[in-house]
Amino acid sequence: MNFVQMRKSMIEEQLMPRGIKDEKVLAAFAKVPRHEFVSKDLQDSSYDDNPLPIGESQTISQPFIVALMTQCLDLKNNEKVLEVGAGSGYQTAILAELAKEVYSVERIESLAVSSVHTLERLGYKNFKIVTGDGTLGWAEHAPYDGIIVTAGSPTVPESLVKQLKDGGRMVIPVGNGFMQVLTVVKKEGGIIKKEEICGCAFVPLIGEEGWRS
Ligand code: SAM
């Protein structure tokens, strides 16, 4: 398979026509080998316009939604970012290309372990992944310039709002167990502003400040 060509087609056919314009985001998508984040039998379809299973009933998100969430963070290369839900590590790699440091919390230990292996094998150094409940954030490294939550939450977790830097942005799907609204939360002078971007469907964010099961 020509994965470089598959990435080019993904960008030209899925991302650019739907409004992904940030050149840095597009460059990260051209660089990160998405096929390395799925099992061998799924590599041929790893650049398709849909999510794919990664085990443990979890998914690697559709390329467009990863790009849209990343673009919403508006990264300039000097930020500290918190990701909730490392999953395969693909979104972590995209963030590692665009920010200074990436901290990621993953609830399922086997996914946390395999995502670290993949990212280390690909040479990424500016990230840390821990197993835990990401609805509580990762206080040790707070505050964050950006927070990205890659699972659907009933509300915006208060702990994450607290760990967001003033002037920072959080991108989070908020809604019920089936459908959510991708929401950008901005903290400006201590005031929280929310902007709704589009409908989306994520696996549930399970934890103390998310869904209970
Ligand atoms: N960003 C991932 C990727 O690129 O592969 C996709 C993430 S998948 C859609 C959502 C992930 O959120 C799953 O791996 C799931 O285990 C994780 N998750 C759910 N609730 C969580 C929580 N409270 N803390 C941390 N991770 C959580």
Image (cartoon, rainbow, N blue to C red):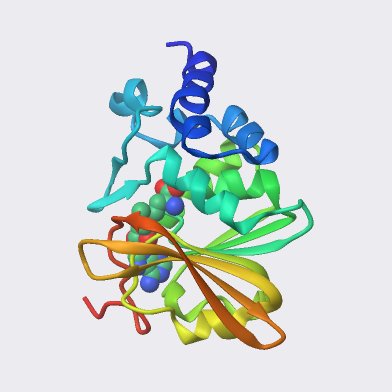
Residue nearest the observer in this picture, 5 or 122: 5
Residue 32: x and y, percent? 57, 33
- For the N terminus, the quadrant is top left
Residue nearest the observer in this picture, 59 or 197: 197
Relative height, residue 83 to residue 166 (above, below): above
Relative height, residue 200 to residue 156 (above, below): above
Relative height, residue 136 to residue 124 (above, below): below
Residue at (21%, 75%) from the top-left corner?
213
Residue 81: x and y, percent? 64, 63
Would residue 111 be found to the left or right of residue 147 on screen?
left
Residue at (30%, 70%) from the top-left corner?
175
Residue 108 can be seen, yes or no: no
Residue 101: x and y, percent? 70, 58
Relative height, residue 166 to residue 67 (above, below): below
Residue 14 can be seen, yes or no: yes
Q: Residue furthest top?
A: 1
Residue nearest the observer in this picture, 34 or 69: 69
